[in-house]
Image: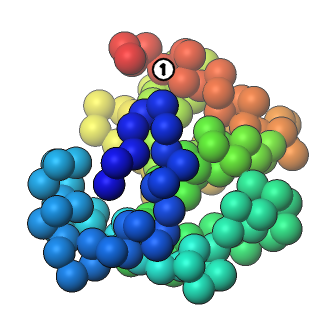
Amino acid sequence: MDASEDDTTNLTPERILQYERDTESLRRPAGLSNAKCKTILAVATAFQDGTLSDSILLGGEATDDVVRNLLLGIKGIGPWSVDMLLLFQCQKSDVLPIGDLAFRNGTRNIWKVKNGKAKGGGLCPKKDREKIEKYHEPFAPYRSLSSYYMYKCSGMKG
């Protein structure tokens, strides 16, 4: 594909879609599974047909909910991936990545939660969702700031 970490200018949807019939050439060098290859091709298609664009994702052309729904409509992209994109790449101000373990561990540590519904008293993204949202409610509409802090307080190395 002739793109490097320093120069991604030729990493375009059109270039990626050249590999649609030969996914092995896309898959092998990057170490991707077939499912990830299909997702990358679907994202490239969405950019090519205008469903997604830099201005939609980064330019404030669409609300966070619209962006979330557009991305979740692509097979292979789930809530965790959307939260990570909105939080770290799009730098949205009100992201609460409840599906992320480090975020939940940080929340558990800060608020000294001992009775979560996950194994070992941890916070479960489904069963403890309301509890997690309640802890972070005072930070709305800037919950991304509390989310960043949870990563620092998670106790995870990385």
Left or right of residue 111: residue 79 = left
Residue in front for this viewpoint, 131 or 76: 76
Q: In the rendered view, tell whether residue 14 sits above or below residue 49.
A: above
Which residue is pictured at 41% across the width and 67% down the height? 15
The amino acid sitting under disc 1 is Ser
* Residue beneath disc 1: 154
Image quadrant holding the C terminus, namely: top left
Q: Position of residue 35 (x, y in %)?
A: 23, 69
Specify few, some or many for label 1: CA neighbours under 10 Å numbering under 14, 14-19, or 20 or more. Answer: some
Label 1: element kind: loop
Residue in front for this viewpoint, 56 or 44: 44
Image quadrant holding the N terminus, namely: bottom left
Residue 142, quarter of the rendered image: top right
Residue in front for this viewpoint, 64 or 50: 50
Which residue is pictured at 28% across the width and 78% down the height? 20
Q: Can residue 137 be seen by looking at this rendering?
A: no
Which residue is pictured at 77% across the width and 63% down the height? 55
Q: Can residue 37 be seen by looking at this rendering?
A: yes
Q: Position of residue 41 (x, y in %)?
A: 37, 73
Which residue is pictured at 49% across the width and 45% down the height? 8
Q: Position of residue 49 (x, y in %)?
A: 59, 85
Residue in front for this viewpoint, 2 or 135: 2
* Image color mode: rainbow
Q: How many marks?
A: 1
